[in-house]
Amino acid sequence: TQTVTYDPGFMNTANARSAITYIDGEAGILRYRGYPIEDLAKNSSFLEVAYLLIYGELPTGDQLTEWDENIRDHTMLHEDIKDFFNGFPRNAHPMAVLSSAVSALSTFYADSLDPFDEEQVHISTIRLMSKVPVLAAYAYKKSIGQPLLYPDNSLNLTENFLRLTFGVPTEAYELDQDVVDALDMLLILHADHEQNCSTSTVRLVGSSHANIFGSISAGINALFGPLHGGANEAVLNMLDEIRDEGTSPEDFMEKVKNKESGVRLMGFGHRVYKNYDPRARIVKGTAEKILNKLGAGDERLEIAMRLEEKALNDDYFVERKLYPNVDFYTGLIYSAMGFPPRMFTPLFALGRLPGWVAQYREMIDDKETRIGRPRQVYVGQDLRRY
Ligand code: CMC
């Protein structure tokens, strides 16, 4: 008989061999293709990092230009995709709209869905990189009743996304270089994180040879959950609540420590990082800089810092090795940039996109990949007669 290992949450089961991202959770190390996240955050751009993740090497100058131009060339959506946006209720969550729209891309590009055809995978990669930012911005525009702008291909991906999100047709949109740089850096920090829930979802769906749009749409839905990408939105809601109800950080911490309350300190804890999350350190520095410039006096930064300080000195958190994760401060930055909480997780999706694409392609190219099919431990009834 075959033995089956019971491993809920895949704590000890590797489902993939991967050469993309390296994490040492004990030492707080994160590297994309060997490059430390700190170096990339400081010196690189989101487009360059996306290329690195997907193709394995940093692009040469010419390769980067070609990659950038290709992505600019494909920003336009089929006009009929826009009808989609009219079909959803006005208060639809942009993550639900985004996953639906990405899934629908497979109907518009039905001639390029073969995961084993290099050309088709290439064009689908470009289309995803170009169109997902546009779809995310449109989901937002619809929710506030503003007209959808056409992309401006004189702008790069990050700039275009900001303009499509905040621009209106009646006046020129002025980019703030500090905001562009900070957002680009945050997208780099989110670009991959090895076999997290959404990436594993993309791989599992893709392992049945499902097309890349459908697989990534499934990943977007996985990311939507509050324990995963939804945490950044949950952090801001938590800070809002503490501020609005005048709860002291001390009282809030007591509630968190009382398991029966069911309240977690959102933005804290990580399955892999048990020392600190290297991304959180970078984000905290940016939060202070951007909030000084844009959101001076945001009381929530104070609250967040006090919560962090309390947690880092509290036995409950120390014993469980709970540290701030990447999401603890990102929401505050996004908020200062003008994004409503509902757009935070779509921003995470935008950042994670190249990681999903890279992992999907690696999975398809790996000769050892088999269809994902976990086993179970059956705990139901023995034979019964009807
Ligand atoms: N607040 C309070 N207690 C916590 C927290 C928290 N944020 N996180 C974990 N714990 C406790 C948990 O109750 C458990 O205690 P005990 O051993 O007494 O039962 C212990 O710490 C271990 O937690 P776990 O839930 O078994 O750990 P996990 O590896 O299954 O979960 C996690 C990891 C990130 C889902 C969890 O820490 C969490 O829910 N954090 C809050 C949500 C969050 O910030 N998520 C974003 C993660 S980073 C971005 C991303 O990858 O999406």
Image (cartoon, rainbow, N blue to C red):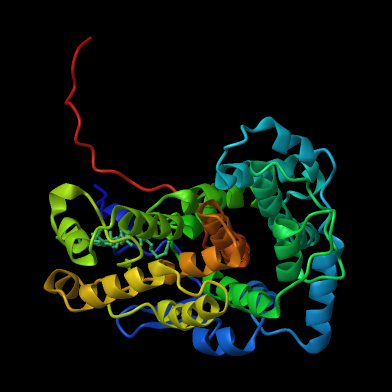
Q: Residue at x 67, y 75 (%)?
A: 180
Q: Residue at x 60, y 62 (%)?
A: 338
Residue 319 quadrant = bottom left
Left of 78 or right of it: where is 43?
left
Q: Nearer the viewer, residue 89 or 300?
A: 300
Image position of 369 with respect to 82: above or below? below
Q: Position of residue 85 (x, y in %)?
A: 71, 38
Q: How many marks?
A: 0
Left of 188 or right of it: where is 251?
left
Quarter of the picture holding the C terminus: top left
Residue 53 quadrant = bottom right
Image position of 325 with respect to 74: above or below? below
Q: Position of residue 294 (x, y in %)?
A: 57, 74
Q: Nearer the viewer, residue 277 or 327?
A: 327
Left of 85 or right of it: where is 33?
left
Q: Residue at x 22, y 72 (%)?
A: 311
Q: Position of residue 256 (x, y in %)?
A: 20, 58
Q: Residue at x 29, y 62 (%)?
A: 11
Residue 77 in view here: yes
Q: Nearer the viewer, residue 175 or 318?
A: 175
Residue 359 in view here: no
Q: Position of residue 108 (x, y in %)?
A: 79, 42
In the displayed image of the protein, which residue is found farthest to the top?
386
Left of 233 or right of it: where is 334?
right
Q: Quadrant of ligand 1?
A: bottom left
Q: Nearer the viewer, residue 179 or 115?
A: 179
